[in-house]
Image: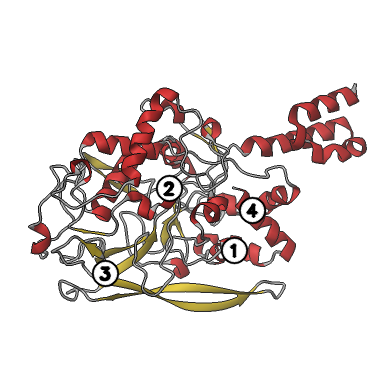
Amino acid sequence: MIHSIAKFILTKYNTAARPYVGLFVVLGLTSFVFIAAAAVDHKNRSLLAGQTTVTQTNRNAFSLPSANLPISKRDQFFIGNAFFTKPWVSAPASTTARDGLGPIFITNACQSCHVKDGRGRPPIADDEDFRALLVRLSVADTQRPDPVYGDQLQNRSIEGVLAEADPRLEYEYFEGEFADGTAYQLRKPILRIDNWAYGEPEQELATSLRVAPAMIGLGLLEAIDEQTLLGFADPQDEDNDGISGKINLVAEIDNSEKVIGRFGWKAEQPTVKQQVAAAFNGDMGLTTSLFPEQPCTPKQQNCLNRPHGGEPEVPDNILDTVVFYSHHLAVPAQRNADKHEVIRGAELFNQAGCSGCHKTDIQTGASAEFPELGNQLIHPYTDLLLHDMGEGLADNRQSFEATGQEWRTPPLWGIGLVETVNDHTFFLHDGRARNLMEAILWHGGEAEVSKSNVLKMSLQERQNLIEFLQSL
């Protein structure tokens, strides 16, 4: 009887349970079934995005539609992909569906920042333009845009218009070591802005560097019920675990009340649609029904007087296809979920306290507009909340409820495929971390204890932890 049940478990769950076969004889049926069930749980959790999860792991891994998206809706996905990938041009142009670029901008296509729908990086060469890295601006100690340069630096422009300035990066380096004596080095970017085209800023500026995040799973994050996020929040740390995540309440277009922010490095945008429209406007100088004005300020007359590509330049039917596309970019499955080192790394991740912010299991709510994304058990490794990450990561720039030291917990799904998709391993909001361990070691504030736990790990434990993250 026992052998029959064991055989059934192995047949049904195969590789998920096989590593535990040797324990069956020693521990007996009850223990074996318990351990096998744990292995199955790891395997089920490898479907990071529930039924929407895809299995491709090559360079196109971030560019696929949700696995459960019906064939009848895939045309809309691929039309959105076309407008996401193809470059926009300045007006007037014969390509009327894609004209209106600028007059000042950062890039001419969404894909230029989110290469292969993935993660951007800071410039590597000294003469490389900022393209997938942008600079947010505000008057120091306020949330007011600069009266001349607005709330985002535009380092490119169309013919006849002056680009705003030339941003450049330098780095400051720090040395440290793990408890076992292994040395490490961290680097911090120092922003330099030269050649202000419209005169030096009249007031001191707060600046913040932001790389383009990966596009996968956005629709699922929007589908998480508000009550779930409010349940994660603990702004007064009432449970005394040292983690006091809070909601960012932000402005929604055509809504007089503030709503929960979910997207952007400080959770500044409430919906995928508003995030997409804001990127069209701020990054490419394209107007939409949500953002009908060019990103030019009254002090930039040569910018304001340029021809436009329609009113709006991105009509709603095009905007909606790009929003649909952005909602349904699929999350790849976890790899090697049943590998011993990965399972051990997941245990260490939890033991270090990382899952206090990087929530493992979340259920999405019902979604009338995007039903394929509703009622999915997902594993995004985020709570979408703001957390104080300490002075080391601070940009000292406020954004709605977010202070200069607070950042939204970024999702970790797909993080192990960034090198495959984007040919780099730069992480954190400004790309300062050159690998996953450096990203961990920059954690402070509410994550200080977790970082300290990692510093105490042995070399083997650190390798297991990283192998787990690379499996996501």
Instruction: Residue lying at the far right in this picture: please name it.
Output: 25
Question: How would you rate the neighbour count of disc 3 (Cα within 10 Å): few for under 14, some for 14-19, many for 20 or more?
Answer: some
Looking at the picture, does residue 2 appear above or below residue 21? above
Q: CA distance from mark 4 to mark 1?
A: 12 Å
Q: CA distance from mark 3 to mark 2?
A: 33 Å
Q: Reading the chain from its start, which is encountered first: label 3 or label 2?
A: 2
**Mark 2 or 4, which is nearer the eye?**
2
Amino acid beneath label 2: Asp
- Image-quadrant location for residue 448: bottom right
**In the drawing, what numbered circle is on residue 140?**
3
Residue beneath disc 4: 349
Q: Is label 3 in a helix, a strand or a loop? A: loop
Residue 138 pos. (x, y %): 25, 64
Locate the N terminus and report the quarter of the image it occupies. Answer: top right
Amino acid beneath label 3: Ala
**Mark 1 or 2, which is nearer the eye?**
2
Q: Reading the chain from its start, which is encountered first: label 4 or label 1?
A: 4
Residue 166 visible to the viewer: yes
Q: Is label 1 in a helix, a strand or a loop? A: helix
Residue 430 pos. (x, y %): 42, 64
Residue 276 pos. (x, y %): 31, 45
Residue beneath disc 1: 437
Residue beneath disc 2: 117
Question: How would you rate the neighbour count of disc 4 (Cα within 10 Å): few for under 14, some for 14-19, many for 20 or more?
Answer: many
Q: Reading the chain from its start, which is encountered first: label 2 or label 4?
A: 2
Q: Reading the chain from its start, which is encountered first: label 3 or label 1?
A: 3
Q: Could you tell me if the residues under marks 1 and 2 are in contact, i.e. CB atoms within 8 Å?
A: no
Q: Residue at x 53, y 61 (%)?
A: 425
